[in-house]
Amino acid sequence: MSMHRQYGRKKTPVTILAASIGLALQFAALSASAQAQQAPATEGEPSGEDLDTIKVTGFRASLIRALDEKRDSAEQIDAIVAEDIGKFPDQNLAESLQRIPGVSIDRDAGEGRSITVRGLGPDFTRVRLNGMEALSTTGGTDSSGGANRGRGFDFNVFASELFSNLTVRKTQSAEIDEGSLGATVDLRAGRPFDYREFTATVSGQMSYNDLSGDWDPRFAGLISNVWADGRIGAALSVAYSERGLLEEGFSAVRWEPSSASGGFCSPVGVTPASTAPGSSAANCATGIARPANTASNVSAYNTAMAPGVFHPRLPRYGRLRHEQERTGVTGSLQFKLTDDTTLSVDALYSKLEATRQEDFLETISFSRTAAQGGKPQTEVVSAEVDGRGNLVYGVFNNVDVRSESRFDELETTFTQIGFDLQTRLSDRLTMNAQAGRSKSEFRNPIQTTVTLDIQNVDGYAWDFRGNDRTPAITYPFDVNSPTAWQWISSPAANSTGSEIRVRPLGADNEFQNAKVNLIFDINETFALKAGLVWKEYDFETFEFRRANETRVPGLPAGVSVADITRTFSGFGSGLGQPRGNANGWLIPDLNAIARLFNIYCNCDPTPGTSGDGDDFRLGSITVGNARGNNFAVTETDQGGYVQLDFDTDFIGRRLRGNVGVRYASTEVAAIGYLATGGGSQVVVKNSYTDTLPSLNLAWDLTDDLVLRFGAAKVMARPQLPSLNPGGTVNTTLRTITTGNPLLDPFRATTYDLSAEWYFGENALLGVSLFYKDIDTYIQTLRETRPYNTTGLPLELLNPVGLPADTPFDITSPVNTPGGPLKGFEINYQQPFSFLPGFWSGFGVLINYTHVESEIDYAISPTSSLFVTENLVNLSPDAWNATLYYENKRFSARVSGSYRDDYLQVVPGRNNNDVEGKRETFNVDASLKYSITDNFSVTLEGINLTDEFNDQFVDSSGDRASVYHHTGRQFFVGARYSF
């Protein structure tokens, strides 16, 4: 059992799913038996041929089309097809993806953002839009990873109405571009030749969130037509939505040992006494007397400071206000140039604009050192520790309290244009050529944090004993009173004051793609495919900061705290926090402070006093704290493939599949900045090649049973931050801390085996086994090796005259041995059409995935000790279940998605062994009534259980790091099709 699962709280036992699978087998047997016993049609009754012409629409039709794609494919795939023109089954693409076996999602602000496929996170999954690789990135809350500077695709950039088909390719074939260990996800927008005639639809919804109380609109429309006897076509779709919600809860910004940061202030005569500046036998610090040597004081101190005791670093309650506006447009032109040649031009545009206001009431002493006026000045009055080493109750004196407000403006603009030419060069030779460009521009032009403070408060307390996720927190002053709070511009020695942080940032991702594929039909059995591909990927990210964020101007004469603050109330609805907790507090008024101090001027209002509180100049590479987020990577990929497709008989049964090999050459150029001379640019280049064979087999063992096998070598390129060559080089100590552009990619050998029993009409019971031998992984470690193996410029050694092969202690990401990943999936899907009357309208989809992995993680970059744990982002167990009902006029469905807890950071920070997120169970529902064949009304609900984002640190301590919720979302709407 892995460490992070030892505390083992489970809401939904796997035994429930096991029972469901057993029930599925019984239904499958019943269905097969019922269909076998159906009598042949008699005279006057509709024949099977007539029944095949009955048009099935709605959700059931989308399942049939998706099942047909799965059954006909030579590879192992799963698909989701739009229910109708411009109508995807879910409000969010990521939330649709979670219905697929093996796919789990992660949410930001209550909305699906990224995916994990069979235990492999976003960095290991490639996404293609209309056949071309693309990447979209957004900015999220700190607890969900913040700004995306990685290879993971943020699905919340796009409205689901823009796409007609979504396919997850779980096995690799030579014709599919390299770059994934987990899966390739194909998103496809509709084209006019898909519809073949005039088609139009329009829909509108209003959404309501029960936590924020906001009503927001959502609209979508599509129009498509063909002309000139079907030789010219055009399609246009548009989607627009607004979204406003609150996110509320408790967070701790991790937990740390009581002995960290210098420990608490010890009573008189008790060792270890703090040796902070100003401390003495009588004082913890200047003006801060030690507690008296009484039995209660000594007991409280010893309890809190016992070995293995942890406490929250920044215990706080907070409210986040999210406002979002999303606009999406797709356009497609198609030209049938000849009977054998079709040219398609596809364009996609999406813009996601958002603001986020974060307000926290927190204590900062418990994460700070003596020089910051932190924990060594804090007296423990009373303490209680639980059996897991958590300081669950404490009363403290000399505590610094803070009101923190942050405001972000965020914007992602995504554009793509692609050209697709398909032509038959002869009776046996076909060519397909694609070229295009996609670009994602993320901007966070305003990221501003301002704080109010009050220092050395006596009688502050927290109490986790009633609930380890929502503690009672006592503030011994009126948190709503302007006279209680301070704007501290000149803090005393060994303390800190108020802060103004200004951190604009952004990230750009651009792909240029070109590929050509040839297909030669050798005969009815074999087809030979070959192709060439060229791709250039450019990534660039930047960030600016003030050189000194902890220095702020003093308030001008006549201006008080009341003039730069405001209050809010009503906090904690649905949170379940204890009575007596603050339901509102005074917060900085960011607009008033920005006007008062002109904080966005990027200037020093008082020249000649650089470095004082008035200096609002921003720096990027010159500011150490920002330098690491200024870097760029360019990858140029070239390659080709050869693949033989076949469709033949084996022992009298159909056997189809493909075998091939793909060659990929990657050239990398990375730009970063070293902490020398105020930030020196450094460029490091690297290259590597991969030869990737693959095999896929699909054998129809019977008319209803398909066996599949897949094997391949696969690769995924290193995470982008790991390639940053920036950092620090110390020629005196001969140490280097940097990224590593010389990394090799992640590489693995994969094996997949599955059996699919299509036991009834549009019914499936499937079992898949998968095994991935991950040959190379990437971790940050320290090793000693010659300087000239780093790729860094040799000129840095010239001033001190060191030889190029001088050994340095280098802390950087390096390739390490990986480990196995294995698991299985069970997939059951069936309409209950064999049941009588009303009951025949029901149907069910159930899938379950179990994944295991073993990766040896170094305890620290300098440690020789390793801990074996699961891959980050891997949930050992996940399942989805949907029960639906549909007839000609009415349809309804309810879906549940469960994801087991998973790790996010290994090893954890602050001496916690891991950091992770606890299990989630989300329930969604949808109702639709068709008033006419063209007009329908809808009612939908998302996150009906109001699931919490519950993040923890430490596998045994299960310490609450984040516990936030966003409420339930309801949609009421109408739809009309022409």
Image (tube, helix red, strand yellow):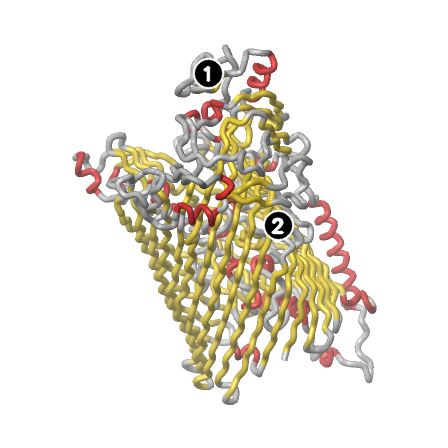
Looking at the rendered structure, the kind of residue marked 2 is: Thr
Work out how far the residue at label 2 is from the one at label 1, CA to CA, in angstroms.
46 Å
Quadrant for the C terminus, please: bottom right
- Name which residue lies at 41% across and 59% down: 441
Element carrying mark 1? strand
* On screen, residue 784 above or below 543: above
- Name which residue lies at 40% across and 19% down: 278
Q: Which residue is mark 1?
A: 283
Residue 426 screen position, x and y as percent = 42, 82
Tell me the mark number nearer the camera, choosing from 2 and 1. Answer: 1
- The quadrant in which residue 490 appears is top left
* On screen, residue 233 above or below 439: below
Is any part of residue 848 visible from this angle?
Answer: no
Picture disc at residue 966:
2
Mark 2 is surrounded, within 10 Å at the Cα level, by few (under 14), some (14 to 19) or many (20 or more) other residues, namely: many
* On screen, residue 949 above or below 974: above
Residue 802 screen position, x and y as percent = 19, 34
Looking at the rendered structure, the kind of residue marked 1 is: Asn
Residue toward you, 608 or 446: 608
